Image (tube, rainbow, N blue to C red):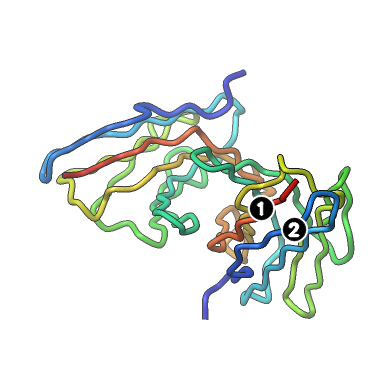
């Protein structure tokens, strides 16, 4: 079992829809959770971080964390073509400072 | 404020050649990381440095060495390049909460 698993994708949604990206992790002691966006040919860019159970909203993005289920998700509301990218989930475990990344989910938003 | 810079952007090596990838950050972060990313895959940690003067192996350290020259700079050396090291290499830095900021990447081809 991988330490961090994401929907294999690719995921395609129409413009204006909600895109839902999911991630599960194996280390129960994990403390910090991140979502990065990576456009093709570019470097990853941090878009959300979440540290406690519940929802965290930032503009059109909502991160959801459920530590009991070892599950973190990212919702993108009113999806735009510019949201088309690969989204990487990262989890910082008990080894503080070191994160493990999932393989990513590629999202395409169709106009 | 340049963030994280990497040199070179592109490099082609022949099997057996050596090279050093340079990384510098101006955000006064303690932790720095080297990752490789192969097509369609997530990020795999090669080495990381939690603070100046310390380095630790990541998931895929074989064939690489690192030097944390000072708080700003973290270099990655390939002593004898192999075709399996063809990849995109990213450097990143972070503070204690684990939010990582990435450089633009180095695209390395080993023939």
Residue A4, picture quadrant: bottom right
In 3D space, how far apart are the residues under numbered discs 2 and 1 (Cα atoms)?
A: 6 Å
Q: Position of residue B105 (x, y in %)?
A: 44, 36
In this rendering, the count of numbered labels is 2
Is residue A2 depicted above or below B79 in this figure?
A: below
Q: Position of residue A24 (x, y in %)?
A: 67, 73
Kindly identify the residue that appears in the image at 52 percent across and 40 percent down: B92
**Same subunit: marks 2 and 1:** yes
Question: In this figure, which residue is indicated by the disc labeled 1?
Answer: A108
B104 relative to A34 in the view: left or right: left
B66 or B40: nearer the viewer: B40
Q: Residue furthest top?
A: B1
Kindly identify the residue that appears in the image at 81 percent across and 66 percent down: A65
SS category of the residue bearing label 2: strand
Q: Chain of mark 1?
A: A
B27 relative to A60 in the view: left or right: left
Q: Residue furthest left?
A: B16
Query: In the rendered view of the protein, which quadrant contains the N terminus of chain B?
Result: top right
Dot 1: within a 10 Å radius of its alpha carbon, few (fewer than 14), some, or many (20 or more) residues?
A: many
Kindly identify the residue that appears in the image at 86 percent across and 49 percent down: A78
Question: In this figure, which residue is indicated by the disc labeled 2?
Answer: A13
Q: Chain of mark 2?
A: A
Kindly identify the residue that appears in the image at 38 percent across and 35 percent down: B106
A51 relative to A56 in the view: left or right: left
SS category of the residue bearing label 1: strand
Query: In the rendered view of the protein, which quadrant contains the C terminus of chain B?
Result: top left
Q: Are marks 2 and 1 in contact (CB under 8 Å)?
A: yes
Q: Position of residue A27 (x, y in %)?
A: 62, 74
Is residue B21 depicted above or below B83 in this figure?
A: above
Q: Earlier in the sequence, mark 2 or mark 1?
A: 2
Is residue B2 depicted above or below B18 in this figure?
A: above
B31 relative to B18 in the view: left or right: right
């Amino acid at each position: 079992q991988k330490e961090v698993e994401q929907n294999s994708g690719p995921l395609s949604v129409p413009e204006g829809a909600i895109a839902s990206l999911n991630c599960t992790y194996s280390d129960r002691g994990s403390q910090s959770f991140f979502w990065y966006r990576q456009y093709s040919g570019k470097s990853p860019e941090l878009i959300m971080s979440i540290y406690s159970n519940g929802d965290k909203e930032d503009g059109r993005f909502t991160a959801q964390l459920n530590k009991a289920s070892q599950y973190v998700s990212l919702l993108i509301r009113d999806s735009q073509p510019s949201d088309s990218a690969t989204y990487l989930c990262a989890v910082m475990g008990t080894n503080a400072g070191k994160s493990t990344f999932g393989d990513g989910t590629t999202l395409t938003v169709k106009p | 404020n340049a963030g994280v810079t990497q040199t070179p952007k592109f490099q082609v090596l022949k099997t057996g050649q050596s090279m050093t990838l340079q990384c510098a950050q101006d955000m006064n972060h303690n932790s720095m990381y080297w990752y490789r990313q192969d097509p369609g895959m997530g990020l795999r940690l090669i080495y990381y440095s939690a603070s100046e003067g310390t380095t630790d192996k990541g998931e895929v350290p074989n064939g690489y060495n690192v030097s944390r020259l000072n708080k700003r700079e973290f270099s990655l050396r390939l002593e004898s390049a192999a075709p399996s090291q063809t990849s995109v290499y990213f450097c990143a830095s972070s503070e204690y909460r684990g939010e990582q900021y990435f450089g633009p990447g180095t695209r390395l081809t080993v023939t």
